[in-house]
Image (spheres, helix red, strand yellow):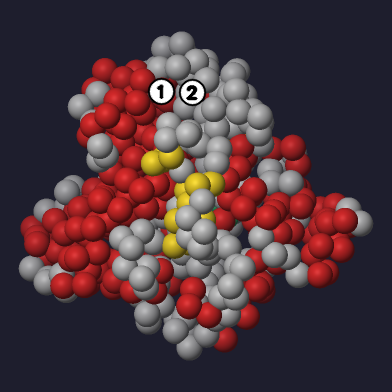
Amino acid sequence: MTAVDPSRLAASARAVLARNDRGTWTVPSTTLYPHQWLWDSCFVAIGLATIDPGRAATELRSLLRGQWSNGMVPHMVFAPGVDDLGSRRLWRSQRDPRAPRDVDTSCITQPPVLAIAVHAVAARLAGAERDAFLADVVPRVLAYHGWLYRERDPARTGLVTLVHPWECGLDTTPPWMAALAGAPQPWWLRAALRLRVARLVRWFRRDTRYVPAAERSSDDDGLRMLALARSLGRAGYDLARLPPGALRVEDVAFNALLIVANRRLAELAGAAGVPVDDDLTAAMASAPVRFEELWSDADAAYCARDATSGAPLGPPTIASFFALWAGVRPDRQRTLVSQLRESRWNPAHPVPSVAVDAPVFDARRYWKGPTWINTNWIVVEGLRAAGESQLADRLRDASLALVAEHGFAEYFSPFDGEPLGADEFSWSAALTLALL
Ligand code: 9WN
């Protein structure tokens, strides 16, 4: 393992964040991702909190300028003057009266790490600056969680339902792509896939101009995701108005992070003196209990579930380990911890996003196998919460060695550490600061 020089590594991480800084918010990557993304900005704020908490607070406030009047925090806030396929023109948020008037946003959300980030930033602020930050932000985060439970868990199951893979953060993760391929498709999409014209989409793709196609989502997956976004628009992005066969998923990563975020939010609300309403309090209390329903005995893992049929969506992925942070049944916790020591989850550069022996594993393709710094950071937090500090330290050291040797790539081959996807990626740099 490469020896890590902490101050050199921190200096390079800061340089990446400075380069990607757009004043009040940070792009994930100057080439591939020129807009603001929800969980990216949260990870950036968590890292910045360790060196410049004031700027970290600004990052989160600027993210919230995209919040909708119903409380939804969109997964993207668009940078003015940058137009690309799959972004502003796809959503046209201005047509929706609930969207903000002064910025364009996407119309779906992303993993709710906002309360976790607000908590991390508030812990580094003091006095009047902290009070003002909490007074401004906490009511808006409460509105966000209120929206999640009100509109995405109308049956009050304690589990929130997602309607698009982009919402789960691990976009092309195998369970979602399998579910998407099996969901009803419009006739034109079926024809396009059959005639293999999806390859033509490559001409319009921005991502493959910067990153080899073998490291990104396949053309078919990409086209299906674009088509799904369009069809959500026809239902007004409203779960209740989706047609019967539409994709509805109780996602593991999202719901695990929501449990952590709920806890942080309850603490923040107490500190800010803002009451939490009864509905939200009840939802927060039932979430960890209902989360256990996502355990699949057959897979010995927490798996996403089809919200309509209740069927588990395999194969298990890195998301199963997010449950360590949420806090789960002790026997299941022990199973997860011992899996992290098995070779299929523990190649040279752990933790792969899919176990290396899974048939769908692909070492270089996006969320289908590579190791990511944000998921490692989440697993480190989870291991600490589970009292597994030695294993947590080992994974932290492995993650730091990976970026020290291969740079702040978007993701890495779990076998040889080859940097993949975008380079100079913001959350890889920011979470390096947090891990240091
Ligand atoms: C779509 C920005 C985002 C991340 C996601 C990651 C990827 C976008 C894409 O990039 O998603 O939202 O273009 O593929 O999967 O987690 O937030 O870094």
Q: In this view, does 28 lie above or below 167?
A: above
Residue in front for this viewpoint, 295 or 129: 295
Residue 265 point in image, percent of width and height: 21, 59
CA distance separating discs 2 and 1:
6 Å
Left or right: 380 with respect to 363? left
In the structure shown, which secondary structural element does the residue marked by tag 2 occupy?
loop
Closer to the N terminus: mark 2 or mark 1? 1
Please say if 123 is above or below 75.
above
Relative to 296, is 387 above or below? above
Mark 1 neighbour class, 10 Å CA radius: few under 14, some 14 to 19, many 20 or more: some
Query: Mark 2 is on which residue type?
Result: Trp
The residue at the far right in this view is 195
Where is the C terminus found, in terms of image quarters?
top left
Q: Residue 328's spot in the image, x, y percent?
A: 27, 39
Residue 66: % across, % down: 43, 72
Task: State the image quarter where residue 67 is shown.
Answer: bottom left
Tell whether 279 sits left or right of 159.
Answer: left
Q: In which quarter of the image is residue 5?
A: top left
Per the rendering, the mark at residue 340 is 1
Tell me residue 210's x, y (percent): 71, 45
Asked whether the beta carbons under mark 2 and mark 1 sit within 8 Å of each other, the answer is yes
At 76% across and 52% down in the image, what residue appears? 220
The residue drawn where x is 25% and y is 40% is: 327
Determine if the C-beta at disc 1 is less than 8 A from ligand 1: no
User: Which amino acid, mark 1?
Assistant: Leu
- Packing grade of label 2 (10 A; few <14, some 14-19, many >=20) is many
Q: Which residue is drawn at 42% across and 35% down?
A: 297
Taking 228 as reference, is 21 left or right? left
Residue at the spot of label 2: 345
